[in-house]
Image: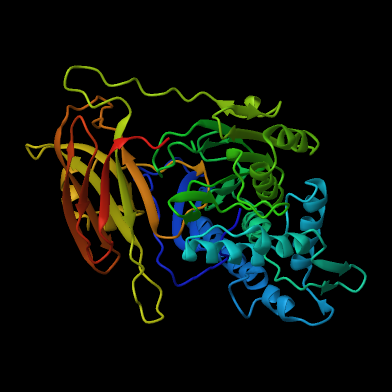
Amino acid sequence: MNLRLRFHLKACAFAFVLMASAPGMLGAAEPFHFHHENILGTSLDLQVSTPESGQAATAEAVVLQEVDRLRKILSSYDPQSELSRLNAAAGPMVVSQELLEVLTAYDLWQSKSRGAYNGHLDQLIALWSKAEKSGSVPSPAELKPVIDSLASPGWKIDAATRTVTRLSPPQSLNLNSLGKGYIVSKAAVAARKAVPTLTGLLVNIGGDIYASGRPADSASWEIGVADPRRSADNAPPLTKVHLVDRAISTSAAYERGYTIAGHRYSHILDPRNGMPAEGVSSATVIAANNASANAMATMLCVLKPEEGLELVKSTPGAECLIIAADGRQLRSPGFAALESGSSPSPPSSGPNAWPSDFQVAIAIDLIKPDTGGRKAKRPFVAVWVEDSTGKRVRTVTVWGRERKYLRDLRAWWKLAQTQPEWAATVTRATRNAGQHRIEWDGKDDQGQPLPMGTYTVTLEAAREHGTYAIQRGQIVCGKSAAKGTIPAGTEFGETQLTYGPAAQ
């Protein structure tokens, strides 16, 4: 799963709505939810189950510190990182235990996948990035020397001296795929060590999730698996699984890729032939740790579905769900035992109902503020829909943490202060930081289908102790597809509204 290992502790951060009901009984664990943007090039969702708000804050701080510490080791985008220094080294270099562990894991998975997984893809990635800019797919002549190089080991490890030597031809090492998963699990372990009395902790960085312990109100963590055909942030999951002390990761091409001559190619590249992987729409893997789950999820997108199933079956404790390009769902033997049912919504009916499977897609691009080096304050966001009479019919989503700041969402608070929305925990392909895609399914707050007509979508955002913006846009929801926009505000760019069939 390729992504930029970037981290900005001073980036904007916000948290999903935390239940504001009366405190529970003394000593009972409560749920604390935190959300941060621009973490390893994506977002971080953290759930902490504990009776003490101070313990939750400590766990949050430790997770952020551990992520930043490991980012300084594994980032291929930070020129000062340990990995960057290794890429520049002309001879053997003494490395940290963490970098040694990640490189050793790459060796293991490259061997088990028979070359379908690789830790030095930088040149191949650069070739496809160049192809996207030029509008022409790489030629066989351009691909051949890169493929030949990938077939050879990229480094040599001397465990006795803890040194690593890059091998000729010296391609830059890129450990983003397994590296992010490694960081997720390490961050969870660090937080549990710092606050051993936590009931549970769930770390979610861009869809790579480690579920430690249990939540405040259940015996296990419920995690949705994103449907590759409907991948909006708030889309119904394809299925749900229940995990305790397990990791889960998903790889897919619906968030990232290359567009060349009007054709969309996956960002997941096959080291054996240099081409984007095409046979699998999505692969979700459950394992003991996120490094293994992440590595296998990426491999399963490259291998044939049947080959991927065999790989997972040969890995103790691992389970998987593979969605083939033709829509087939392939499960490992133990995956179904971890699932819970997810009933689809009943179809709309009536003479004035929306066309079958139509929805409104809402693409929100939050603006990262220029703070002059100071820590950015958290934004609080609400999106809701009004009908042609001005009546609010649906609160699509609300992001926030504390009721005292949610009151700054003046319009939404006046309309729906008693109806806070919750964000589901979903394993999904990694998306870019600040970019959120949500959808409205044409139903009201009670789940009843609404008729065709013209609707107004409102986007309201308030930053803690800071700026405020509210903008509205109309969308015609009739018998045919339509588009609309919400103008840009101080907290968000122009928001696109797209009415039509759900993406398949």
In the image, farthest residue toward the right: 160
Would you say 4 lies left or right of 361 here? right
- Residue 132, percent from left and from top: 49, 61
Image quarter of the C terminus: top left
Residue at image point 72% right, 76% down = 87
Judge left or right: residue 393 versus residue 327. Answer: left
Judge whether 276 appears above or below 357 on screen. Answer: below
* Towards the viewer: 259 or 30: 259
Q: Is residue 193 visible?
A: no
Relative image position of residue 499 (x, y in whole percent): 26, 39
Q: Quadrant of residue 408?
A: bottom left
Q: In screen coordinates, is 326 left or right of 154?
A: left
The correct choice, above or below, for 155 with respect to 438 in the image is below
Relative to 391, is 176 above or below?
below
Residue 160 in view here? yes
In the image, residue 198 lies at what x, y percent? Answer: 59, 49
